[in-house]
């Protein structure tokens, strides 16, 4: 597991622990609602960690499609291969393009909006 991921998970676990400790230390009248709020926050954080990779993959596929459309208009009749670096230390939205007629050269595109 990448160190960035470990730090994110530890910080989230610390926040959840702090919320539940605070919820149990509150008076009995509002304890129930504070536990519900802490539980809801826990579910939202878990959903964030589960859904984020799928969201990034969806965004990358859309950006790859847009880049393909752009390259078809800019360089008609040429072939290319689009890839991206994997890993947390790399920006997933920077797409690397290697043209068929320029082997060994890689161009990096960042598709925004």
Image (cartoon, helix red, strand yellow):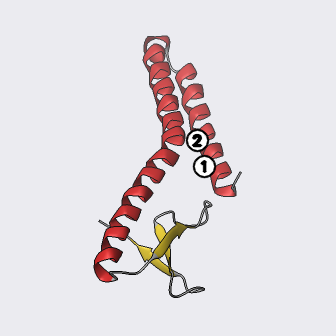
* Placement of 53 over or under 44, stated as above or below: below
In the depicted view, which residue is nearer to us: 53 or 2?
Answer: 53
- Label 1: state its secondary structure: helix
Q: Are marks 2 and 1 in contact (CB under 8 Å)?
A: yes
Identify the residue position indicated by label 1 in the image. 8
Judged left or right of residue 87, residue 48 is left
Q: Residue at x 51, y 20 (%)?
A: 26
Q: Position of residue 35 (x, y in %)?
A: 50, 20
* Placement of 74 over or under 55, stated as above or below: below
Q: CA distance from mark 2 to mark 1?
A: 6 Å
Q: Residue at x 71, y 51 (%)?
A: 1
Q: Position of residue 2 (x, y in %)?
A: 69, 55
Res. 24 image quadrant? top right
Number of the label disc, if any, that sits on residue 12:
2
Q: Position of residue 80 (x, y in %)?
A: 47, 76
Identify the image quadrant of the C terminus: bottom left
Judged left or right of residue 56, residue 77 is left
Q: Residue at x 44, y 25 (%)?
A: 37
Q: Residue at x 60, y 27 (%)?
A: 21
């Amino acid at each position: 597991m990448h160190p960035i991921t470990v730090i994110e998970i530890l910080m989230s676990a610390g926040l959840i622990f702090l919320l539940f400790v605070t919820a149990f230390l509150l008076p009995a009248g509002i304890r129930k609602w504070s536990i519900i709020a802490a539980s809801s926050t826990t579910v939202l954080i878990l959903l964030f960690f589960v859904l984020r990779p799928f969201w990034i993959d969806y965004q990358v596929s859309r950006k790859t499609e847009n880049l393909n459309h752009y390259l078809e208009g800019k360089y008609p009749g040429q072939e290319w291969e689009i890839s991206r670096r994997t890993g947390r230390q790399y920006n997933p939205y920077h797409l690397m393009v290697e043209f068929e007629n320029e082997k060994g050269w890689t161009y990096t595109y960042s598709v925004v909006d």
